[in-house]
Image (spheres, helix red, strand yellow):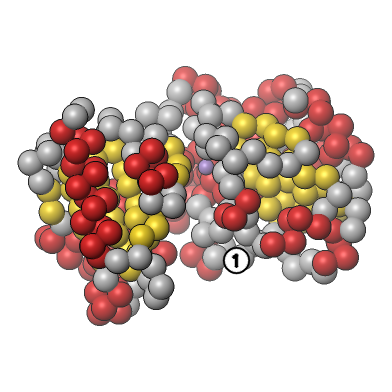
Amino acid sequence: MIDEIFKQIEAFQTIIIHRHVRPDPDALGSQGGLARLIKDHYPDKNVYVVGEDVPSLAYLNTMDDIPDSAYDDALVIVCDTANQARISDDRWRKGRFLIKIDHHPNVEPYGDLMWVDENASSVSEMIASLYEMRPDLTLSEDAARLLYAGIVGDTGRFLYNNTTPKTFETASRLIQKNFDRNTLHDRMYEMPLPLMRLNGYVLEHFELNEAGVGQMRIPIELMQRFGVTPESASLLINSFSSVTGIKAWVFFIEEADQIRVRLRSKGPVVNTLAAKYNGGGHPLAAGATVYSWEACDQVVKDLTELCLNK
Ligand SMILES: [Mn+2]
């Protein structure tokens, strides 16, 4: 598989790398890390990263502005994106060959070639493993920084159960490069004051039922009151995850035309529940979409049943 991917990389002069919408550090880290890997090893190739720019993550990487014509004879690689609807920048279809590299359950296979490893903590960990498989590649400081950020992000600083011995081995190799880890950590975990205040509100108002289900509803008015966007409000998902007795929890974040459902769990499998509500994800971290607060009641009811049967 890896040889097959490198064969395609070698065959194309232009390589365009996509990732999912609303990127997280793994999306940007794997995308940027792979771009660096290719650029460092094949300096003559045109390698681009595309997708929407996110100001709060600009310290990780910024995107390239490319014309449609760049896709005419391009290899397109999509990182960290389980389904096609979540790929940022619709032009991904315009390339000549498509590769999917992901670590989410492969419920929607796509592409001419797929490298999917559900056991990897992150796509950043997968990209970092390429350096082991191909000793002829040299790991640059910037690639190490990007890939390390992706691993730290997707493992919740090595705390989530997707963290394996291999994750630590990979991180150990990455931090041998001389990037500024403290500054990176500070940037990744700093919180703007409005969001910090909303966090205080969430801690005061979340509910926890006898089944161990935590829930928090965040209507638009609340976000307006605190001056916080839905994207940043969703960063508070683990705000009360350490409360005693909690088994699983859900955040409902209202948007103009839908309510985003963010599910997390310490045991009960929640991605099957998410699938019932137009969503999906990992067994212990999933997302879905509903269209009314009544539907949110139903999600909580389902989640409660799931936790009671556990
Ligand atoms: Mn990921």
Disc 1 is placed on an element classified as loop
Residue positioned 27% across, 59% down in the render: 295
Judge left or right: residue 31 versus residue 196: right
* 64 versus 8 height, above or below: below
Disc 1 packing (10 Å; few <14; some 14–19; many ≥20): some
The residue carrying mark 1 is 53
- Rendered image quadrant of residue 187: bottom left
Instruction: Decide which of 178, 224 is in the foreground and name it.
Output: 224
Quarter assignment of residue 191 = bottom left
- Can residue 300 be spotted in the picture? yes
Ligand 1 under 8 Å from disc 1 Cβ: no
Q: Position of residue 277 (x, y in %)?
A: 38, 51
Viewer-nearest residue: 205 or 57: 205
Q: Image point 86% across, 32% down: which residue?
A: 7
Image x and y of residue 9, in percent: 84, 39
Q: Nearer the viewer, residue 91 or 70?
A: 91
Task: Check the image and report above or below for 21 versus 265.
Answer: below
Task: Report the quarter where the C terminus lies.
Answer: top left
Q: Residue at x 69, y 23 (%)?
A: 132
**Residue 262 image position (x, y, % from top left):** 35, 52
Residue 171 can be seen in this image: no
